[in-house]
Image (cartoon, rainbow, N blue to C red):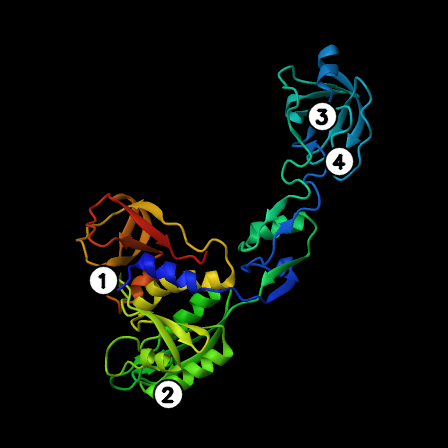
Amino acid sequence: MQSVQEAIANLIERASVLPVVDSIKVTHSLGRILAEDVVACVDVPPADNSAMDGYAFCYEDAIKHDYSLPISQRIPAGTPSRPLQANTAARIFTGGEIPAGADTVAMQENCTEHGNTVKLSPSIVSKSNVRPRGQDITAKSIILTAGAHLGPAEMGLLSSQGFNQVMVYARLKVAIFSTGDELVEPGFELKSGQIYNSNHATLIGLIQSLGMECIDLGTVPDDLEATKAILQRAALTSDIVISAGGVSVGEEDHVKDAVADLGSIEFWRVAIKPGKPLAFGRVGDTPFIGLPGNPASVFVTFTVLARPFLLASQGLRVRHKPMLKVAALFNRPAESREVYLRGRLICSEKGDGVEIYPNQSSGVLSSVSWGDVLVRQNSGEKIQFDDLVDVLVYSSY
């Protein structure tokens, strides 16, 4: 049985990025993965400009004239400046281009106008309040590298260079299905012994939150031939197949055997709690991940194990979510496996830190909805109140 870290490394090693790329509008690129490096074509800012409203002048001229200079021009942002006349100042506004001959800007709050003359504060420091050309970006520099996740900041950065199109990897198509005779889709009446299928909606949400396309194949009964049929269909319509349930050792668990018959099982079982019976293999050439069936186990194993594999396959350069160090607001005895506890970050009279849901059973999906983080408890580790623990935030990236 592999450790969690071994399983993640093995999954990422087996990930391959699809070569298909799309050219899309920058304004439509939120959540996509950049397919090629982006090189700056202009300096930002394109010229020295003022960091605030005030007066631009040559510092040496101000000293010579006792910080009192006539105003020779007005420079709003977006208006070309003229060279500054010697021994004068220019009224300038935030973003305005610094005129040739000026090297300093005095903020207007520290200045007094008398007719067409400005009295500058002697406390002004030379070269103050000037944003130099290329302070943010210099032309021909790489501003984003292939594999970057495009968020609002990256979209703005691309726009600052005049790009309206960007090359991104095509969205992964991930097929999902659930197994179990006991499962009923929401909207239908439950009969004795049946439960509603929550894994279906959970997986759709998790996959869509990563910016990927989810192909929903519904639920398959506990039958070997039916399981083979849905696996073959999934492999033909998707880039990656994910199932929930049917990978344990019960007589009605057919997924692992079906995958082995149609392709291969490359590893099975991970020392994680909840969720030990996790399988990775291939249906033909299509990668397959078999998650356990309990609802909390599905969420945990997807977040900890399946997510890094999917993002690596999507082309994301940084695939591991960083762990935060947070004070534990609970006590917990040691366990033999690596445990991921459903918890939430709080600020309270007890202190700032993370608390955990009272019932950590793998079937308690409400613990996931209640929380916003997973608390990692290492194998053999005892956690005591106020210990610093590793915390993984749910959010997608």
User: Mark 4 or mark 2, which has the lower sequence index?
Assistant: 4
Amino acid at pointer 2: Ala
Q: Taking the image as drawn, is residue 125 in sight? A: yes
User: Mark 4 or mark 3, which has the lower sequence index?
Assistant: 3
Viewer-closest of 1 and 64: 1
Write the residue at 80% across / 25% down. 84
Relative to 217, 74 lies left or right: right
Amino acid at pointer 4: Pro
Image: 372 above or below 212: above
Write the residue at 62% across / 50% down. 156
Q: Taking the image as drawn, is residue 304 in sight? A: no
> Which class describes the residues within 10 Å of circle 4: few (<14), some (14-19), or many (20+)?
some
Q: Which mark is residue 239?
A: none
Between the residue at mark 4 and the residue at mark 1, the CA separation in whole angstroms equals: 63 Å
Q: Position of residue 166 (x, y in %)?
A: 64, 58
Residue holding disc 3: 55
User: Mark 3 or mark 1, which has the lower sequence index?
Assistant: 3
Q: Position of residue 396 (x, y in %)?
A: 44, 58
Answer whether labels 4 and 3 touch (C-beta < 8 Å): no
